[in-house]
Image: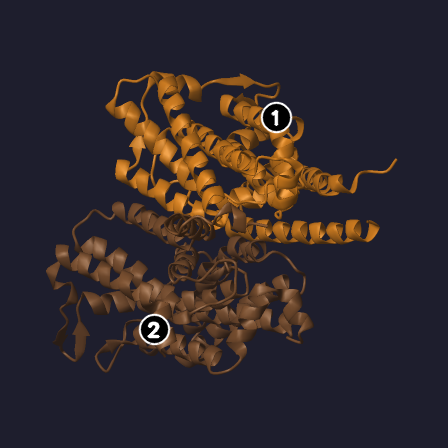
Chain colours: A brown, B orange
Amino acid sequence: MTRTLRRILPQILTLAVLVALVSLFFPQFLSVDYQGGRLSGPVIDVLKRGAPVALLAVGMTLVIATRGIDLSVGTIMAITGATAAWALASGWGAAAAVLLALMAGLACGVWNGCLVALIGIQPIVATLILMTSGRGIAQLITEGRILTFTDPGFAWLGSGILLGLPVPVYIWVGTAIAVALLMRRTALGLLVESIGINRSASALAGINATVLLIAVYVASGLCAALAGIIATADIRGADANNAGLWLELDAILAVVIGGNSLLGGRFSVAASVLGAMIIQTIDTGILLAGFPSEYNLVIKAGLVLMVLLVQSPNLAGHWYALRRHVRRRREPAPSDRSAP
Amino acid sequence: MTVNPRLYPLLATIGIFVVAYIVCWLQFPYMLSTRVAGNLLTDNAYLGIVAVGMTLVILSGGIDLSVGSVIAFSGVFIAVMLRDTGLHPLLVFALLLAVTTAFGAAMGAVIHGLAMPAFIVTLAGMFLARGASYMLTIESVPIAHPFYDLLKDAYWLMPGKGRLTLIGVLMLVAVAAGALIAHRTRFGAQVFAIGGGEQTARLMGVRVGATTVGIYAFSGFMAGLSGIVFSIYTGSGYPLATVGTELTAIAAVVIGGTLLTGGAGYVVGTLFGVLTMGLIQTYIVFDGTLSSWWTKIVIGVLLLLFILLQRGLLRVTALRA
């Protein structure tokens, strides 16, 4: 437990600093009201609006842990959203729509996973294929229109309230906890990490790397499907052009802010989800603090650079060399005679 | 006569383009006119130019996600400078190219200096350039300058009334220059060497740091040039323009037969990749009944085909060796 806490401490500190910073400009940031059976306030808003990126980040963490990347998650959101809206428009009911959307996400994940694990295409290219063609597929499903629906049961998934909190919050928190438990209470997380560090060595050690790789992309597809369902349910319509647009980059950013290396290996789902919340706090905070939203991207870029600086393997090397240099200066220089 | 296996992807690209053009011509005889050919060049000029820069980056085994934002920034920068200052457009162009080249060089320096993946560094660059253009303006700024009208109307009437525009020619020049740099200079050889393997390149005596900076500076320069062309093409600067162009450019490079792991490919292939993608769009316009989303799906299928072809080739060459 303490090890987990120590792992996610930098992210918690960053989030705390950000919240303090936003509160400075917008003092009511942390205030939460209870009105008409629902909690409301900026923090609740951050939790709700951050749901899609947080969900994507959960799947993306696993993919990045295997030294991969999934560029197609935003597009999968559009495909699954379109599928769900199509099912509702054809009168299938909410449960069937959710199931069908999840199946679509699963199929997308299997496709990506097979390209990466079986054919051996670089992940970035393999998922680029679905990223470019997927929006076309989504538009094919919606026939280029914005499919709207009125099903209250499905819309509840996006804008409903359960015990005072928005439903999307339960979905992403539940998914994150489920995935984290599955990874850490079983050996699965260790196996995923070992593939990321060295796939052929893991395969030689008896790990079924091929199946596990496909499973990781399937998990990412399913998370994207959940995000797509939430996004579609929230606006009660499927927009094949704009649903999940560029969210894959936010998700990757969340994982990187979460301190996970893009080169695979050790990962932390909790840190990635915190990364997603950091991004959403910046987005919401900039609006609330009264800055023009134009500054949003520049601030994000600055943040990425800071995280890069901290994570850089080279910089750590320089720092180590510098410290050694300083220490050597403090100690008396070894006399020449002792050298052989 | 045996053909170098390295040429197969390039030949496949050119072959697919020729076959596709013949199929289009059989269905719509008017496709084989200088008008359509001229428009194909003009409409894809900005994409072709930026794809040349991307080709070099990908040849070195890297990736540059910032180019789409840099194009948008260029358009906004030009439009705002022309609106607010009395500078001549040529001077603004020079300023802009200096800024984007320096921007690319800075990204290259960060990539090499911090040993970070190009993907995430250029992602930050993408946010930065897009953010900078938002900060200049959030509206579409029209460009009204007599010099711009001159540039826009500069074309050579080909036989058959097709227009070979200045920006179309500029793209061809950019491709030729890119091909010369990649295949005929020492810098180009170093780019290929890094793409083949950074460790081996270092052992060969390639100055990896300087070359990396040069590669991304070149990509930044091409993105700036592409921004100028795009501003001539649209006659305005808009901070939301060319979102996602970086991925279209990457797709064009891959369809052009360049290996995404780096180290193998031809700049000329990229030109045919761009033209193939443009041809699909032209075909859909000619057909009139097909919906625009088929463009995306067909491009995705083409991408898959080329990647599979490259995998097969790698296996074949590995078997021979």
User: Looking at the picture, how far across and down is residue A284, in whole percent?
Assistant: 24, 58
Q: Residues within 10 Å of mark 2 (few under 14, many from 20)?
A: few
Identify whether B70 is placed above or below A127: above
Horizontal placement of A233 versus A212: left or right? left
Q: Amino acid at mark 2?
A: Leu
- Measure the C-alpha gap from mark 1 to mark 2: 56 Å
Horizontal placement of B166 versus B318: left or right? left
Badge 1 element? helix
User: Looking at the picture, how far across and down is residue A268, in whole percent?
Assistant: 42, 69
Q: Amino acid at mark 1?
A: Ala
Identify whether B207 is placed above or below A182: above
Labels in figure, total:
2
Residue B266 visible to the viewer: yes
Q: Which one is in front, B309 or B220?
A: B220
Q: Quadrant of the N terminus of chain B?
A: top right
Task: Return the mark for residue B176.
Answer: 1
Badge 2 element? helix
Task: Return the mark for residue A5.
Answer: 2
- Quarter of the figure with residue B195: top right
Which residue in the rendered view is the most extreme toward the right? Answer: B1
Identify whether A180 is placed above or below B190: below
Q: Which one is in front, A111 or B62?
A: B62
